[in-house]
Image (tube, rainbow, N blue to C red):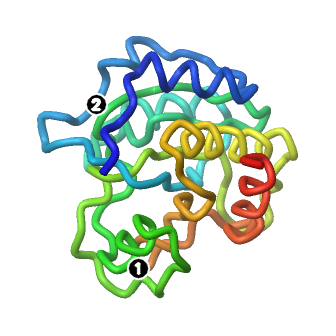
Amino acid sequence: MAPPMSASKFLAALKDEGVTVVEVGDWRHHNRNHKGPWGPVHGIVIHHTVTSGSERTVEICREGHPSLPGPLCHGVITKDGRVHLVGYGRANHAGNGDDDVLRAVIAEKALPPDNEANTDGNRHFYGFECENLGDGEDPWPEAQLDAIERVSAAVCRHHGWTQRSVIGHLEWQPGKVDPRGFTMKSMRARIEERLK
């Protein structure tokens, strides 16, 4: 059971891990907390945006769209490796996912297949959206992969979690494919190395 860290500690943790941070508006108080609690937190979900263009991507992730109000994550990781903080608190990113996956994340064990959508992930996960078309062809620059590794390690380090606390949206919610273009197994290996 981990309470979410404060916005100030979150910002400090990212900077301590060498993340280049861009603070967008009043990100510390931009959230969906009126829709339900945020926490206890148990892990991190990595997404791709299916957008191109950093400015537009950050705007969409902050504001959302008519069917899904923002923020759509806590941080947007653009192609240049910068992390744009757009919200803090409950965010519309994980949606409902598999309770067996959540139990595996909490226990830091290998993930079972996600075959149910019965558990509120927005309550339990930090979320990072990564600027990418998600077609399997749009490249993932090393600066961006490095930033995904660093933000994940920063949050894990603060909470005393291992790399097993970092999952892809495709591992949480049936039918999701993100992130596409690298494997979560390879990203968890990078995070594990950084945590050493």
**Apparent side of residue 76 relative to residue 60 in the rendered image (left or right):** right
- The residue indicated by pointer 1 is 174
Q: Give residue 37's position: percent from left, percent from top.
A: 17, 42
Residue type, mark 1 in image = Pro
Q: CA distance from mark 2 to mark 1?
A: 25 Å
Q: Give residue 83's position: percent from left, percent from top.
A: 63, 29
Q: Give residue 6's position: percent from left, percent from top.
A: 37, 23
Secondary structure of the residue carrying tag 1 is: loop
- The residue indicated by pointer 2 is 31
Up the image or down, 16 lies above or below 119; here it is: above
Please state which of residues 29 and 70 is positioned toward the viewer in this rendering.
Answer: 29
**What label does residue 127 carry, if any?**
none
Crowd tier of the residue under label 1, counting other residues whose Cα lies within 10 Å: few below 14, some 14–19, many 20 or above: some
**Which badge, 2 or 1, comes first in the chain's sequence?**
2
Q: Residue at x 38, y 57 (%)?
A: 94
Locate residue 153: give its quadrant: top right
Residue type, mark 2 in image = Asn
Secondary structure of the residue carrying tag 2 is: loop
Q: Residue at x 53, y 52 (%)?
A: 161
Up the image or down, 172 lies above or below 130; here it is: below
